[in-house]
Image (cartoon, rainbow, N blue to C red):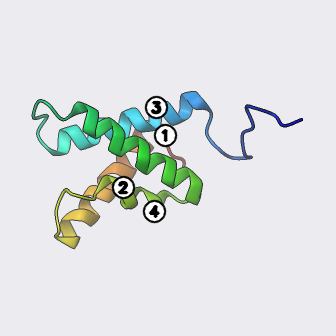
Amino acid sequence: MHPTNFQAPGAPTTDERRKMVEIAAYFLAEHRGFAPGEADSDWHRAEKAIDAMIADGLAGGLTHGLTRGLSSDSVHRAEVSEGIRNALKLGGGLSG
């Protein structure tokens, strides 16, 4: 018998994960100037990155999916990554 709703110790709840995705997606939309027509893309990129971050267990994992496609400039990518981490901290989605 296998539990269907297993949650690893320290893993966010479903509600906490959704809040993290909301914050990250909002940050992505804000970063691109809230141009219309990209909300679904922002949401999917945020989900993918947050899930990778949770799987990695590291806040640094946010850079994996969220910054891809924003810019090839590594300084710009680092600034976006830092902004996302800060947005999650301010929104209560990350501790530390």
Label 2 neighbourhood size at 10 Å, few (<14), some (14-19), many (20+)?
Answer: some
Q: Amino acid at mark 2?
A: Gly
Residue 29's x, y, as percent?
A: 21, 38
Asked which quadrant contains residue 56, the reply is: bottom right
Q: Earlier in the sequence, mark 1 or mark 4?
A: 4
Q: Are marks 2 and 4 in contact (CB under 8 Å)?
A: no
Q: Is residue 43 above or below residue 81?
A: above
Judged by depth in the image, the label closer to the viewer, 3 or 2, is 2
Label 4 neighbourhood size at 10 Å, few (<14), some (14-19), many (20+)?
Answer: few
Q: Which SS class for mark 1? A: loop
Q: Nearer the viewer, residue 94 or 26?
A: 26
Residue with the mark numbered 1: 93
Q: Is residue 73 above or below residue 71?
A: below
Residue with the mark numbered 3: 19
Q: CA distance from mark 1 to mark 3?
A: 7 Å
Q: Is residue 88 left or right of residue 43?
A: right
Q: Amino acid at mark 3?
A: Lys
Q: Are marks 1 and 3 in contact (CB under 8 Å)?
A: yes
| Residue 96 in view in this figure | no
Q: Which SS class for mark 4? A: helix
Residue with the mark numbered 4: 60
Q: CA distance from mark 1 to mark 4?
A: 14 Å
Judged by depth in the image, the label closer to the viewer, 2 or 4, is 2
Label 1 neighbourhood size at 10 Å, few (<14), some (14-19), many (20+)?
Answer: many
Residue at the extreme right? 1
Identity of the residue drawn at 33% across and 36% down: 43
Q: Which SS class for mark 3? A: helix
Q: Earlier in the sequence, mark 2 or mark 4?
A: 4
